[in-house]
Structure formats: structure tokens, C-alpha cells
Amino acid sequence: MSDLRFHWMLPKGGEVVIDGVQTPLEAARYRIESIRATSPAPRPDLRGWTHFALAAEEAGIDSVLISFSRYEPEPITVATALGLATKKLGFILATRSGLMQPTTFVQQVNTLSALIPGRVSVNVVAGSSREEQRGYGDFLEHDDRYARADEFLAICRAFWRGDAEVDFDGRYYKVEKGKLHTPFVDPQRAAPEIFISGHSEVSERLAFARGSTYLRVIDTPEKLQRTVGRVLEHDLEVCLRLCILCRDTREEAVAVAQSLLPLDDESTVGHKDDSQMYREGAKAATWLNRSLFAGLVPHYGPVWTTLLGTPAEIADALLEYKQIGVTQFILSGWPELDEVRRFGRDVLPLVREAERAVCV
Amino acid sequence: MMPKGGEGAMKTAQETSRVLTTKSTSLASLPDMEGWTRFARAAEESGIESVLLSFSRYEPDTIVVATAMGTATEKLKYIVAYRSGLMQPTTFVQQLNTMSGLIGGRFALNVVAGSSTAEQRGYGDFLEHDDRYARAEEFLAICRAFWRNGSDVNFSGEHYRIEGGHLFTPFQSPDRLMPEVYVSGHSEQAKKLAMAQGSAWLRLIDTPEKLAPVVAPMRERGREVALRCCVICRPTREEAVAAGLAMLPDTEIEKQERGILQRSDSQTLKQALAAADDVGWMNEHLWAGLVPFYGSSSITLVGSPDELAREFVRYGEIGVTQFIIAGWPKLEEMQIFGAEVLPRIRRMEASA
């Protein structure tokens, strides 16, 4: 079995504190404020990002996920600037289908891949809020958005297969003799790795049809086992999205997690009305098992399902997921910078050591 | 004009021709950070304000390239050519606004409605010429609404519909609220679009006499006029003309033929040569002779530094304010322009 791959969430604008200390509580405060108009989150923050990216590279992180929303800078341009400022970090570019012609998307992704070979993958999202989509000129409903995403990726894949001319006549897209000269450049792959995320049945179908990796929020190994099995049968990888909170003792980690619960009814999740994942998250129990804490989910969203404990406990938990066939993780923390350093220093060596032991 | 990928190593005009650079094996399909950065630095030193990045299916994406080049330079601006109809305007503005924050707003837009129906279809766009302009007008109207407000953008047109559009990432620039928008094209629709939604009309150069009547109405409407041209500058006009002729394809054959004609004592042959050389001269310094080989944007101002400076100033007198220039090779010609022509223009402007 090959080594687990670990990715991290790219912090938002102004989130990384370069000179000074940021407590977990301050990081939480930043998150709560991040959708307000006064937040620095929408502004590109090359200095903070570069600082984080270098720390992530040093920690042994494979790629950073750059999320897409109207609240944030646009991922492809961010990856271009940040990719040229770093050496080996990869970028998982979140994109919504329906906002660009697939030919144009491929031209942009290929151009970026030629600038930073081997470091570009994509995460195709069908869109999580109807209201937000309409601001982008997209008036389709949930299931239709997935049907369109399927066509979108079919066209992208035809370009990446290297078809001399791409012809497609579907319900949402029509392309005639499509041709792009700028190739996708990667020493290992002919097409970027395609992460498909979502918890609905249609998203799973889309992943099986067009994806290379199925991305979903973490749950207990027991609950995930069947889904993972199904995904593996389709020759896809499984990548889990989670938050990590590592301290010297479990008690310390639990105390930090509980301190992050916001006051009153502050919540950043109100706007995702159209997402199956968010509806599930709102109903989750607080502790999914001894190390998996869902208490932050109702306040910050499902991706803040948190794996917590000592370095050894976290390493063991991650390896349990490897046992059931999970191969990749996308992590975040409070604050991102401290947690990625701790992960690289304390957790990752234990994971690698265990992986070596299994190999021998 | 920004050189294409690999163009820095191409030493003759012939190698840079459209015919060769649109072959799938051409280096023009790949980003060329090393060559571009060298060119960009030279452009900054030569007093060039911006470089135009052209858009086609044969080349890397212009927004990604401008972002990359913007982080590699400090002063130079990038005129990003893009076609309307390839992206939702909201997405487009989000990309441009992000880029503005990354490179200090150092870019302008050149909106092209699309010059080839076949190429557009490969991008999933099946509209015809006039409809593409109508759509471009809606596209730019929505972009401008985002740049004016940022939030609560509503639009219901024939080609686009936006409801409650809101982008949090602002356009960031030390001196503008939105990027400068060049609209290019010679058709009536293009001119109309430039007047309605552009800040400048970009077109091919022609003689000052021919341009004066079309430039004036643009200026009256508060639009700038930018001309796309090429330059061949040498110490004397004769040398410049010879340099231009050397750029014609099959130079060997042409040289031999020319030798035959010149050595002949036949008045007829001499006159034929003179006439042939006249074809394509729009006036004493404006030469269209390269157009059949290098495309319509290769109409070229040819002459000595003094002559060229005078020509540029003449365009200034009829209201033209900007030029987008190319040469062969681009780097060397730009350096000649910066060293020889531009200082003369500045002196003439100062004394005027």
C-alpha cells in the first residue's frame, strides 16, 4: 500500500498571522467574521499564503485546497501566484461547473500546469447555494447542476485525453472541433486528479463517472466503510475532509475544542441552503466516537468535524482509515499555521513509521 | 505586443509567422516565463507602459499568464485579451479582481468578440458575429455593474441573467475603480461597443488622413483611440525598407529576382520593380507589404528615428493617444524604439 497523502486547506486572506501568536480562539473569531463585509478574507494575501505554504511544504503536506465562493478570491489566479512563490506544493483548485465553458477551464488549468508542472488538481463542485449560483448567472436546480457537471467533465476529459478535436453535443454544452494547443503538463499524469465532493447520491454518481477521487467529510470508520468499499470498486480513491486538533494530552485537546464553541447563535453556515452535506451536518451528534468531535459542526459547518487527541491517538486514527481503504486527507486546524506545523512535527512521523513497519 | 512562447529564441520574422506558431508543436503553446520576464524587464527599461497578451486556442490563457507575469515584474502592465462568451461575467470579474489584488491592479482588458466562428465553436460558442457583439455589450455592462457596486447586481438580458450578484473580492488598484477596457474591431458593432462600454477603441493603424474622421467621434464621446501597428526603425529610411523587405518569406528567391531586375537595363523591368514595391505602401512610411505573410496586424511604420517620431506625433495630432506596437524581433525592435524613437517623441511633445 502506498503512503497516505495529506493535504491542507489554504487559509483565507488575513488569516495567517506572520509576526506574533494567534490563539485557537482568535482563529475561531476570524472564521466567524470571515463572511462579514469588513473581513480581510476576500482580499488576496500573497504574503500570508506564502508564509503558510512554505510551512506546509516543510511539514510534508502534498497540496492545498483552494476553496471557491463569492466570499473569496478566485482559486486559479491564486494558485498561479502562490505556485510561482513555492517549489513543490500542489494545488487543488475548487471550481463550480456552470461558471465557465469547459474549453476555457481546460485552457486555464493547462496553462497553470505548464507553469508549475505536476502540481495541479481540481475539485469540481456543483454548487452549494442556489442564491449564490444565481449571482453567477446559474439558475439550474441541484440535480440538474450535477447533470451539467457530468457533461462539463466529459468535455474536460476529452481535451485531456488528447483528442485532436473535441466534439460534444449535450443538453448543457455543445462543442465543435474543440482544440487547445497548451497541454496539461505533469510528469505523472495525462489529466489532473479530479476530486468530486458532495454527499448526495448524484454527487456519488458523478464521482464514479468522471472523478478520480471521491472527497467527503470524515465520519467514523464504521460508518464510512460501505461507502468507501463502493468507491474503491469503481477504481476511485477516497479523500476525507476534516479538522485536526493535536495536543500533548487528550484533555488539553478536548478543552481547546470546547473553547471554540461560539457564543450565542453565531454561525457561518446559514447560507448553504442547498447542500445535502450541510443538512446532514446540522443533525450530527456531538461525539461521533472517542476522537471524532462534531460539536463545532452546527456553528462552523461540516468540514469542522474534528479529529482530536495526542499525536499517537491521531496517527492511530488516521491509520484506521487507511485500513478501510482511505488514501488521502484534507486537513485544517485552528489556527491553520500552528496545527500544520504540529502535524508535520508530531503526527506525520508516527504515521510514516507505522506505514514503514507494515511494509517490512 | 508580448512575444509568444519561445519567440525570444526566434531570430527571423519568418519563424514568428502565424502559420508556424499555430502548429501544435510550436513553442507558442507553452508559457515561457524566462523569455517573457526578460522581455518584460526590457519593456520597462524601454519606457513601454503595457504589453498586450493575445488570446487564442493556440496560446496559454491570458489571465493566468498575466497573473504569473505580474508577480515577476513591478511596473509593467498587462493588457489581457479575452473573448466574451467563454465565462459568466461574474466569474470573469472574480478572476480579474483576484488578479488585481495579486499584482496591484496592473492590467487592462481587451475585449474581443471573437474573430473566427470555427474557433468560437470549439469554445462552445455558436453565436454569429453581430450577436457576439450584442452579448459582449451585456457582458461588459454586468462587469461594470460589479465594478461600480460589488453587490446587488441584477441583470436580465438576452444573453445573461444575474440575480443578486455579489462578489466580496474588490478590484484593487492605486488609481482606478475598474480596469481600462479596450474594445477592438473595425465593424460598426465594434465601434458601437467601444462607445457604449469601452474606455478605448483599439484598431489597426491606417494613414492619419483616413483615420481622422473615425477618430474624432470616439474622442468626442470621451473614448481614447489606440492603434495596433508594427515598427521597423533603422538609421535611414533606406535601411529600414531593406530590413522590411528581408522579412518577406522566400527571401532567397526574392533576392535573386530582385538582382535580375536591378541589373537589367530594361526600363520596363525597372518600372515593374518600382511598381511592385509601391504596392502596399499606404504612404511614404506606412507599409502593408507584410500583411499577406504575417497577418493584418503587421501594417508597419518604416523609417528613420526622426521620421517615425514625426509619424507618431502626427497621429497624436488627430487624437490618437495610444499605440500597441510589435516588431521583428520584438525585443530588439522595442529596444530601438525605446532608445531612438521615444525620446524624440517626448522632446517634440515637450516643445509643442
Image (tube, grey):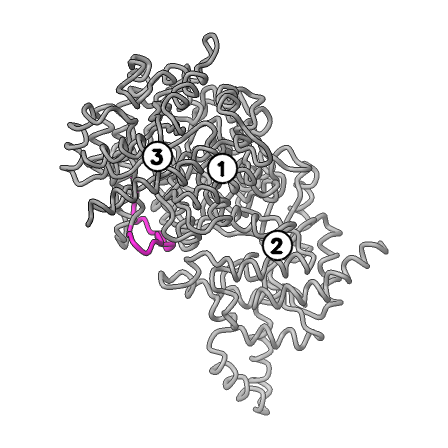
* Residue receiving disc 1: B95
Write down the quadrant of residue B59 in the picture.
bottom left
With respect to residue B205, does B285 lie above or below?
below
As drawn, is A21 to the left or to the right of B350?
Answer: left
Q: Amino acid at mark 2?
A: Ile
Give the mark nearer the N terminus: 1 vs 2. Answer: 1
Q: Residue at x 45, y 9 (%)?
A: A265
Rate crowding at label 1 as few (under 14), some (14 to 19) or many (20 or more) other CA atoms within 10 Å: many
Give yes or no for residue A176 being in the magenta stretch: yes
Residue receiving disc 3: A330
Q: Nearer the viewer, residue A148 or A19?
A: A19
Residue B154 shows up from this direction: no
Mark nearest the camera among 2 and 3 is: 3
Residue B46 highlighted magenta (yes or no): no
Return the x and y of residue A300 as percentages of the image width and height.
41, 19
Q: Is residue B317 left or right of residue A136?
A: right
Choose between A229 and A244: the one closer to the eye: A244
